[in-house]
Amino acid sequence: MKQNKNRGFWLAGTVCAALAAIACLIVEYGYEKIILPRGYQWMYPWMQTAVLTGAVVFTVLAVLCQLPASGKKKITAIGCVIVAGIGVVVCSGLSEAGQVQVLRSPAGNYQVILEKDEETGQLMLNRPYKGLFRYQKELLPFTADSKVNSRWLQEDACALYGTDADGNPAAYLATYGSRSMDDIAYVDPLSTMHGIWEETDADGQTWTLSVGGQDAVKDAWVRLSGKTVTSWYGEPECERYGTIGMILKDGTQADYFVVLNKDCVWGDSGLIGSGSMTICKADLDEEPIILSRQEDVDGDRDWSDAGGVEDIGQAIWAENPDSSFDAAFGVDAEDTDAGTGSQSNDEESWDEGADAGWLHSESEAEAFVEGTKIRYQMIVEDAALGSRFYGLIKSTDGGAHWQVVSSDPFGGQMGGSVEFTFLDEMFGFATLSHNGGDAAVLYVTEDGGKHYEQVEFAHKTYTDSIGNIVAPYDYPKMPYEKDGVIYVLCGQGADGDYDGGDSLHLARYRSEDYGHSFVFDTLVDGTSEG
């Protein structure tokens, strides 16, 4: 009886070990065939070693369980194999230590992932994906062997300071969030920081940061004073990151990191109410200072430095009325009536399988999956001040019957108009336009439209004739796939007049992570379709 029980125990062990080995092989196959081609890698290099080692260890364990040896010998052998496997993974981790460094935010919501790029000899910024993977974002100005100091100035903003290839100090600001009410991330930080910010530090010194009042003598957009030192920064010296931060630079030398704090809220006409920002010396050796926004930024302040104009907004328009920076301060004045915008379909109703509240909603746009009877429609659920709140419905029989995919596919985001496409039944893109069609935000879905995630762009920028840094190609069209690569063409939107406008050139961007972010590829003819 005891012998039969032992035989059953070892048989069960064999089956479990074999299944575990198969599982490891399936994970490795999926990683090589699905994950890697989409531009993702394991979060840490040793994780792939762990999967492969697991496949070998469990295979050996399955064999050991069936050997005609005593139970004690088998257990001893199994223990040795497990210890050896753990040793291989640990040695792999130690040998690759420093190749990938993960900096977690104080609350653990965000991660800055630094990877040594052997080809360029620089550090590469990676972004996390699904907790287990990462994808390459962009090259950093630091050498791979540079000692990089870091400090999280906010939960979603991490300041980095190190040295470049020439041994000179270099700085970078990694941002992951927005301060917008609707989480739209395309507003220039110089717009969101517009105003006067003040605070007294621990030494009793008053710091004042003025953003937007152009100085007639220094020709500066930003003026910083504190500790008996006053610095001026022109727009080209304000290196912007995302929508919430910038680095103030004296020529090529970084002076200060500046980040909007979480208590700032951006609305259609600017920051709403009060708020605060964090400012920190670029070398990160001193404690950051929290500056508070003043309530009378557009009121009774004496802005004599702005050419004698008292109101900040007037100063900006008087000094630089044609700047693209000015247009970012608010929405198009004509785009104020609910329900405006073009329609691609008439009002439509469908069968009772759809939500009862949507039976007579307005269909804004429609998309098809090529070669199938699958159709999708974006439905206008609500509208206010020229923006619309959309839902998504789907038909699998060519439009005879419809079902609700999501009543909130964009996570509460609104837009003036919508355009969308599906490359297959689950994978697709959509754009929401803003500011009267001046710009649009691109989204990607991998679950058939239930949820859309905002796509990140490393926009192509230029410096115009008066020194402004502009990113004119900010209106993405629908992405497409060619030779296994996802591309998207971007125009300039309704306000586009840079270098001949869309009729002359479009910017083509390519994705290296299957549609989650895009980098500039080339300029193409304005009539090009890809």
Image (tube, rainbow, N blue to C red):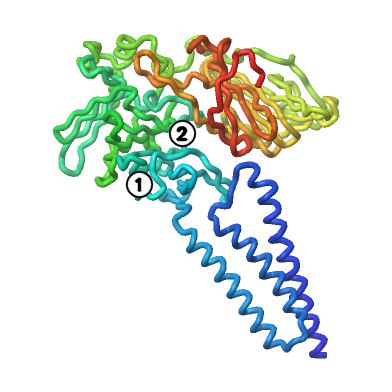
Instruction: Look at label 1 and name its amino acid.
Output: Arg
Q: Which residue is mark 1?
A: 151
Specify which label sits upstream in the sequence, 2 or 1. 1
Disc 2 from disc 1: Cα separation? 19 Å
User: Which type of secondary structure does the marked residue at label 2 adopt?
Assistant: loop
Q: Quadrant of the C terminus?
A: top right
Q: With respect to residue 325, does 262 lie above or below?
A: below
Report x, y in % for residue 416: 58, 19
Q: With respect to residue 142, does 346 lie above or below?
A: above
Q: Is residue 388 visible?
A: yes
- Of 383 and 191, which appears nearest the observer? 191
Q: Which residue is mark 2?
A: 178
Residue drawn at x 28%, y 28% is 251
- Of 128 and 154, which appears nearest the observer? 128
Asked if residue 405 lies left or right of residue 490, the reply is right
Report x, y in % for residue 41: 58, 49
Residue drawn at x 74%, y 16% is 347
User: Which type of secondary structure does the marked residue at label 1 adopt?
Assistant: strand
Report x, y in % for residue 383: 60, 20
Asked if residue 278 lies left or right of residue 39, the reply is left
Quarter assignment of residue 168: top left
Instruction: Look at label 2 and name its amino acid.
Output: Ser
Looking at the image, the residue that sits furthest to the left is: 228
| Marks 2 and 1 in Cβ contact (< 8 Å) | no
Residue drawn at x 35%, y 50% is 147
Report x, y in % for residue 291: 28, 35
Local crowd at mark 1 within 10 Å, few (<14), some, or many (≥20)?
A: some
Q: Nearer the viewer, mark 2 or mark 1?
A: 1
